[in-house]
């Protein structure tokens, strides 16, 4: 049973999180760098260019990389201080085996043999699918490809899925359905060229800060800005129109905006006729969504909804951007489709300054969802349930199509399978579900029920604390590879330094396990470059075709946009030009979507909406950023934002301790009484574990198509702590 | 010639500030800042707004910090840059902290030393932009000439600030969205922006 081997204090004493404030030897002793490595930040999907400064084979600082076109030197605080992860005191530098009382270091051979032996035994006793793999969207494309192949070929399990399930999958599924492929439709340079930026469910300034610059560049040319969000975020503060939508009602709001657009005759009938399917059903569906009819539902006055529609139709060119705010719902896919309906009905796509994008969250949020580490996917963004796709990849991998596992469970479902003991063994890499999944108590129970759990991690995440065996892997700057940014631009992560002695590159660890599972000949890679060569060949002919991309081209061209099927192909910054979509008939699909309530509805006992999100100085489950001193100082712990009207009802003042309780669990937090969110909604950031984890309160309800959890709406009660 | 080109200045446009503190974190990474930030960023009134504002040195024509310094530790160069206190001279009296109308200098009690923004002199004197303005994601901090700024975006440049009747001329500049008679700082509060409560329907709870 994968329980924590000793008390938290003992673990924290050894493994942290401790706070790093200074480069090795301190600022005063910081040496002139021996070299400056042009690479990218390890955190979000913007993938800003940075230069890592290396002295005596240690990363000692950063410099802005002003020549890199996407961010031109601009950075958020995470990018500036991320270098403090290297040389961190908390690094794991030996395989660790769980024993009563704590973890003990063991040798690599013993560790790798143990993994192979335990998995083989579990699979022989309980079937191949009794072992599952959890992977992540901060992994490079090479590693994402490798994990998919490892699960399907070396382990032969159907159960592999990734933490992008918490991130981009609602957008991905909706994009696939509407456009026939899953990628931001436009390069970010198109944002700067548009006349109206429509941002919904994206706290751009904190979660994708560099995008703020593109929006301002559009506004400097006279573009207008509409922001839809239950919270008045920094980007919303200066918007031309701000709609404080009630959590979970986005479909109704977007349908209402389209209702008004059609009422005004704002549709592009030629575009609809020539390039789309299904408009009549959408027109019928939005007929019932007159703003005056749904204003109480969405919590925004009808006049303002009409204003949004007027701004949209009044603009020659529009760009619609969204992120997790509309995607983290049991109707995440529908929310996205309701946005795409507006874009398609007005023909606002596939032209300069005209388009649509979901802003990806994780470092390789785009690429990591293309190369086959998703439960329903094979390399090249192929469909694991499509017989042709299966045959193609089985042949490519040199296995019988019958041996290729079928679609497996999503990553939250894998936790559910572990809870039911249908999954007995698990390997995780780049995933910290104990902090990031909803209903943390359930996740903990599931981990504790595993027979054998191995975690590949550079730091001891809260999830890794439950592992039977921890294999110390590599930080982003300790390995080479590629990632694909939010724009669909494939970028080169350069290796700055070697992993510390005792740790190994992730791909090497995975290949070594595969070899011990008698699959060595299919995992004989000697470098990430060799994995990339196989990846791009595997992707050839698929939707996400990387065949024409090489590390050298990326370096020369500052990134290459996929699809890029040949070495001569220029890459594809803007998709769907000329109204040509990726479905076989080249037409986009409208989707008539109706409002549905949240899976965790308000009632008299739980009368307040809870919504969760990020702060600019922390990243995701915090396994990295909670170890960086200057970032922790910027936001040391979670808090709850409460509108003064709500606070006064409960006699709560600024700075007082309050208790939030949901149908799952409760949490005590410090109140921040601010008038910058809806009075019926409270907000808590989610980067922290244990007693500080807001995901103890969120619920395990998922979008029926994409499997994304409903982080953005939970019902809670509020009380002042006595 | 050493020094910062006279036409290059730092523009501060609080309207664009998103409060991310990239400027503060980057300042501490400047090679000669030793891990300390010389600038700061404040929430203006978090209870009612997410407005934040970075505070960099405005490099006054007639710097009050230097005038108030009894040890002559603060020097203004011929290029108009007002330098941080010279370590060997600074007596840690905090006169400069009190004197500066913009609230720029910090007194560091651990090092018994005043520090303030020196326009990233080691960078700007070598034709590099200051760290803060290089990293700022929204160009709330922008470094360049007035012409460069105005070729990129609208806004009015202000290099004179009136503090309760006392006019201060600065080398650096503020950018404001609307033309006015200059920037006047006084104790009178401006009228509040519209409240979110006016923008949304949320009767159910209240």
Image (cartoon, coloured by chain):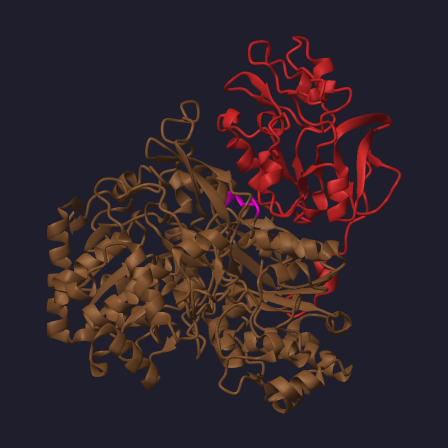
Chain colours: A brown, B red
Q: Is residue A423 among the parts visible in the rendering?
A: no
Percent position (x, y) of residue A484? Answer: 45, 60
Name the side, left or right, on which A291 lies relative to A26.
right
Picture quadrant where residue B44 is located: top right
**Residue at the extreme right:** B181
Residues A436 and A664: in front is: A436
Q: Is residue A681 among the parts visible in the rendering?
A: yes
Percent position (x, y) of residue B123? Answer: 58, 29
Locate the N terminus of chain A and report the quarter of the image it occupies. bottom left
Name the side, left or right, on which B43 lies relative to A583.
right
**Which residue is depicted at the point 36% across and 57% down?**
A139
Secondary structure that dominates the magenta span? loop
Name the side, left or right, on which A637 lies relative to A153.
right
Q: Is residue A77 magenta?
A: yes
For the record, the magenta segment spans A72-78
Residues B112 and B115: in front is: B115
Percent position (x, y) of residue A552? Answer: 41, 54
Determine whether A58 is above or below A441 in the image. Answer: above
């Amino acid at each position: 049973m994968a329980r924590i081997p000793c008390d938290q204090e003992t673990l924290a004493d050894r493994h942290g999180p401790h706070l790093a404030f200074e480069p090795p030897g301190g600022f005063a002793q910081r040496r002139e760098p021996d070299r400056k490595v042009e690479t990218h930040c390890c955190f979000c999907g913007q993938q800003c260019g940075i230069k890592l400064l290396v002295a005596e084979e240690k990363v000692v600082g950063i410099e802005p990389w002003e020549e890199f076109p996407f961010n031109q030197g601009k950075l958020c605080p995470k990018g500036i201080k991320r270098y403090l992860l290297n040389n961190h005191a908390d690094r794991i530098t030996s395989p660790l085996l769980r024993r009563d009382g704590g973890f003990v270091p063991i040798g690599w051979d013993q560790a790798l043999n143990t993994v192979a032996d335990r998995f083989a035994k579990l699979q022989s006793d309980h079937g191949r699918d009794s072992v599952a793999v959890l992977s992540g969207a901060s992994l490079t494309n090479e590693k994402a490809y490798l994990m998919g192949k490892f699960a399907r070929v070396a382990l032969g399990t159907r159960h592999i899925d990734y933490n992008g399930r918490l991130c981009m999958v609602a957008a991905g599924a909706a994009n696939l359905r509407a456009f026939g492929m899953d990628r931001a439709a436009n390069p970010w340079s198109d944002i700067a060229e548009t006349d109206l930026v429509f941002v919904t469910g994206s706290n751009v300034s904190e979660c994708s800060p560099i995008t703020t610059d593109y929006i301002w560049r559009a506004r400097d040319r006279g573009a207008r800005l509409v922001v839809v969000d239950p919270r008045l975020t920094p980007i919303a503060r200066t918007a031309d129109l701000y709609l404080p939508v009630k959590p979970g009602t986005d479909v109704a709001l977007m349908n209402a905006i389209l209702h008004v657009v059609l009422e005004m005759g704002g549709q592009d009938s030629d575009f609809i006729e020539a390039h789309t399917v299904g408009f009549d059903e959408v027109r019928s569906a939005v007929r019932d969504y007159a703003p005056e009819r749904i204003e109480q539902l969405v919590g925004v006055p009808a006049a303002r909804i009409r204003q949004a529609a007027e701004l949209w139709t009044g603009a020659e060119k529009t760009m619609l951007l969204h992120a997790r705010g509309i995607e983290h719902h049991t109707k995440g896919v529908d929310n996205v489709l309701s946005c795409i309906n507006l874009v398609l009905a007005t023909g606002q796509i596939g032209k300069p300054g005209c388009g649509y994008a979901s802003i990806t969250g994780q470092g390789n949020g785009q690429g990591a969802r293309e190369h086959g580490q998703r439960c329903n996917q094979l390399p090249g963004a192929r469909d694991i349930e499509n017989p042709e796709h299966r045959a193609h990849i089985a042949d490519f991998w040199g296995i019988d199509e019958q041996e290729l596992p079928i679609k497996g469970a999503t990553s939250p479902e894998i936790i559910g399978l572990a809870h039911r003991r249908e999954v007995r063994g698990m390997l995780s890499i780049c995933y910290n579900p104990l902090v990031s999944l909803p209903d943390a108590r359930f996740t903990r129970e599931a981990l504790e029920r595993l027979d054998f759990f191995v975690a590949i991690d550079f730091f001891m995440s809260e999830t890794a604390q439950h592992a039977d065996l921890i294999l110390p892997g590599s930080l982003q700057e300790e390995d080479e590879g590629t990632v694909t940014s939010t724009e669909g631009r494939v970028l080169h992560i350069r290796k700055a330094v070697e992993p510390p002695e005792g740790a190994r590159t992730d791909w090497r660890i995975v290949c070594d396990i595969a070899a011990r599972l008698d699959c060595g000949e299919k995992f004989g890679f000697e470098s990430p470059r060799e994995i990339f060569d196989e990846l791009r060949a595997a992707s050839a002919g698929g939707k996400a075709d990387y065949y024409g991309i090489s590390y050298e081209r990326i370096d020369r061209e500052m990134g290459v946009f996929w699809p890029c099927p040949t070495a001569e192909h220029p890459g594809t910054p803007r998709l769907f030009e000329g109204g040509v979509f990726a479905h076989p008939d080249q037409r986009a699909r409208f989707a008539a979507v109706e409002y549905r309530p949240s899976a965790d509805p308000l009632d008299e006992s739980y009368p307040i909406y809870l919504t969760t999100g990020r702060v600019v100085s922390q990243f995701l489950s915090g396994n990295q950023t909670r170890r960086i001193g200057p970032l922790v100082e910027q936001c040391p712990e979670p808090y709850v934002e409460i509108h003064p009207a709500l606070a006064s009802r409960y006699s709560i003042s600024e700075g007082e301790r309050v208790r939030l309780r949901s149908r799952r669990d409760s949490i005590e937090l410090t109140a921040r009484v601010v008038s910058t969110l809806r009075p019926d909604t409270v907000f808590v950031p989610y980067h922290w574990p244990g007693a500080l984890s807001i995901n103890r309160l969120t619920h395990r309800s998922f979008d029926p198509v994409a499997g994304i959890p409903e982080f953005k709406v939970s019902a809670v009660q509020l009380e002042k702590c006595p | 010639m050493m020094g910062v080109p006279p036409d290059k200045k730092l523009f501060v446009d609080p309207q664009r500030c998103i409060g991310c503190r990239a400027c503060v974190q980057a300042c501490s990474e400047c090679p000669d800042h030793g891990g300390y930030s010389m600038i700061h960023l404040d929430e203006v009134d978090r209870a009612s707004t997410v407005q934040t504002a970075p505070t960099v040195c405005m490099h006054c024509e007639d710097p009050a910090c230097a005038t108030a310094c009894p040890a002559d530790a603060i020097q203004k160069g011929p290029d108009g840059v007002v330098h941080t206190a010279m370590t060997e001279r600074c007596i840690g009296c905090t006169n400069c902290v009190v004197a500066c109308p913009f609230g720029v200098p910090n007194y560091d009690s651990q090092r018994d030393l005043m520090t303030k923004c020196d326009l990233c002199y080691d960078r700007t004197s070598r034709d590099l932009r200051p760290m803060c303005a290089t990293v700022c994601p929204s160009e709330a901090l922008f470094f360049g000439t007035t012409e460069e700024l105005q070729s990129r975006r609208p806004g009015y440049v202000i290099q004179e600030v009136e503090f309760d009747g006392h006019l201060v001329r600065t080398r650096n500049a503020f950018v404001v969205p609307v033309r006015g008679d200059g920037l006047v700082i006084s104790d009178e509060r401006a009228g509040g922006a519209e409240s979110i409560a006016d923008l949304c329907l949320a009767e159910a709870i209240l």
